[in-house]
Image: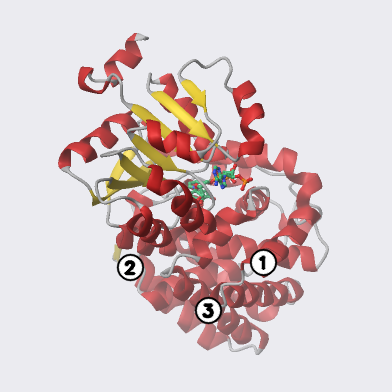
């Protein structure tokens, strides 16, 4: 055992085994990080991935790949289910009864309501339940990122064991109940994703790669484009799961669609005074009054971060934009009484970037007034805004009706449209997130 490993593992837990059911992106990330800290891991995915996983982890003597979740459950002291949120009920029903006597079980799914229900229904009563959620993607360094821990049904001793195991991630632990978790992630993740998913659909509908041409290059546009591509480059089920299965998320996504539609109508009908009044009222509710703002002295995002990461060439005079997506986001927070700063301890990098961009726009009266003027006078973006509005309503309807398959298809066609550009864009998105994380440390 390395010295780092021996530091991480107390003598009383030397034979403690962590089980991972689901070896996709998150399961593998946990397997690598926990085993590097010295923990013994038993892991499985579906049977048809057994050989490939054995090969992939052949040089890691701390990770043992097994054929299925029964074998993992029987032999592990702390089992983490890291499968699709929509499958958690089925998978726990299958393997839960095989859980080792007195073990601890948790899950990594992004939405805790179905996960906890599955555990309560299918785990033997002698098993403790402690769930977790790393609030970042598998390629983000977990150091300093929020890690939610949920002590749902567990002794203090079991909970302390989970804390000891996950300490090697060096994340910032946030203690919540399952309900609090779902409420906060609905406010942060689900509604943020709705904005980017809608942007992608709008650009796709108008058949444009937004970074090609003068309309969408530089500043705020860089963040929109990079994050939109980052989301469409991922697996659909992650986003569908956390929107559709989170009972708290439906209201938020619906309000985002409503805010988008109502602001769009005001622009379309040239109702400048009403638009201004509404946006400034939302600003005050979300960001505070002029003399007592809720934002810090220092902006969340520096201008150079906004401009540094561009997929296109910055034109001499970029066209101004009304930023309907950002106005709608702030209107939505305002309508629901959400103060995004209250959720910072439990936020993803993507949410912090999105809030940073909103703040950037709303901190600068000149920029905001320009948006409102463009929204009324300039018709350059009308088509995109129409498509954005349609898309936001489409996602909201799909979520409200719990239409997984329609959701998948809506995502897949747009994913296919942007696919040729993912490679460079995902790298750029990673760099952008890294730069923001670095600047947060300063
Ligand atoms: N990706 C992210 O950024 C984050 C994701 N999460 C959550 O973590 C969970 C996992 O996500 P992620 O790793 O990205 O998704 P992946 O699709 O990469 O991984 C899930 C894995 O579980 C496997 N699986 C499904 N059923 C079984 C089964 N019966 N036995 C064993 N393995 C099974 C899947 O196989 P198959 O593909 O064949 O179904 C797949 O390989 C999700 O609930 C997600 O919401 C949490 C934080 C961040
Ligand atoms: O940062 C985001 O919102 C992401 O897109 C990555 C992500 C996806 C799912 C999670 O449960 C947590 C993080």
Measure how far apart labels 3 and 1 are at the Cα level: 26 Å
Residue 158, above or below 393: above
Whether the residues at callouts 2 and 3 have beta carbons within 8 Å, the answer is no
Q: CA distance from mark 2 to mark 3?
A: 19 Å
Q: Which residue is mark 1?
A: 405
Q: Looking at this view, is 328 or 131 the one in front?
A: 131
Q: Give whichever of 218, 31 is nearer the camera.
A: 31
Is residue 292 among the parts visible in the rendering?
Answer: yes
Q: Residue at x 51, y 72 (%)?
A: 253
Q: Residues within 10 Å of mark 3 (few under 14, many from 20)?
A: many
Figure check: 381 above or below 27? below
* Residue 187 picture location, percent across and down: 42, 64
Residue lying at the far top of the rendered structure: 2
Relative placement, left or right, of 118 versus 384 is left
Q: Which residue is mark 3?
A: 259
Tags 1 and 2 touching, CB below 8 Å = no
Dot 1 or dot 2, earlier in sequence: 2
Secondary structure of the residue carrying tag 2 is strand
Give the label, 2 or 3, closer to the camera.
3
Q: Which residue is mark 2?
A: 288
Q: Residues within 10 Å of mark 1 (few under 14, many from 20)?
A: few
């Amino acid at each position: 055992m390395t010295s780092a490993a021996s530091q991480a593992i107390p003598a009383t837990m030397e034979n403690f085994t962590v089980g991972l059911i689901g070896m996709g992106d998150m399961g593998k990330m946990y397997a690598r990080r926990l085993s590097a800290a010295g923990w013994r891991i038993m892991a499985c995915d579906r049977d048809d991935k057994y050989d490939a996983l054995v090969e992939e982890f052949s040089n890691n003597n701390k990770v043992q790949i097994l054929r299925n979740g029964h074998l993992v459950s029987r032999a592990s002291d702390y089992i983490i289910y890291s499968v699709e949120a929509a499958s958690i009920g089925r998978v726990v029903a299958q393997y839960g009864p095989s859980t080792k006597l007195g073990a601890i079980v948790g899950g990594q799914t992004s939405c805790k309501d179905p996960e906890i229900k599955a555990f309560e229904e299918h785990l033997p009563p002698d098993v403790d339940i402690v769930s977790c959620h790393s609030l970042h993607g598998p390629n983000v360094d977990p150091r300093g990122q929020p890690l939610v821990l949920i002590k749902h049904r567990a002794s203090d001793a079991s909970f302390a064991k989970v804390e000891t195991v996950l300490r090697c991630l060096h994340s910032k632990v946030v203690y919540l109940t399952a309900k609090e978790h779902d409420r906060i992630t609905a406010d942060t993740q689900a509604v943020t994703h709705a904005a980017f998913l809608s942007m992608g659909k709008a650009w796709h509908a108008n058949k444009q790669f937004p970074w090609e041409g003068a309309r969408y290059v530089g500043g705020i546009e860089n963040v929109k484009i990079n994050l939109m591509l980052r989301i469409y480059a991922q697996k659909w089920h992650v986003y569908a799961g956390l929107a559709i299965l989170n009972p708290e998320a439906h209201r938020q996504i619906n309000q985002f669609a409503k805010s988008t539609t109502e602001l769009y109508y005001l622009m379309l009908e040239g109702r400048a005074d009403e638009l201004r009044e509404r946006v400034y009222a939302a600003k005050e509710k979300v960001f505070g009054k002029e003399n007592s703002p809720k934002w810090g002295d220092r902006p969340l995002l520096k201008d150079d971060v906004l401009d540094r990461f561009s997929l296109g060439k910055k034109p001499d005079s970029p066209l101004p934009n009304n930023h309907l997506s950002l106005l709608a986001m702030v209107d939505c927070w305002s309508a629901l009484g959400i103060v995004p700063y209250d959720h910072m301890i439990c936020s993803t990098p993507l949410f912090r970037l999105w809030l940073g961009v909103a703040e950037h726009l709303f901190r600068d009266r000149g920029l905001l007034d320009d948006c409102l003027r463009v929204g009324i006078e300039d018709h350059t973006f009308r088509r995109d805004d129409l498509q954005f509005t349609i898309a936001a309503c489409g996602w909201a309807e799909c979520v409200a009706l719990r239409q997984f398959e329609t959701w998948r298809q809506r995502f897949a066609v747009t994913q296919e449209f942007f696919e040729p550009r993912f490679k460079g864009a995902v790298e750029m998105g990673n760099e952008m997130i890294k730069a923001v994380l670095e600047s947060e440390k300063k």
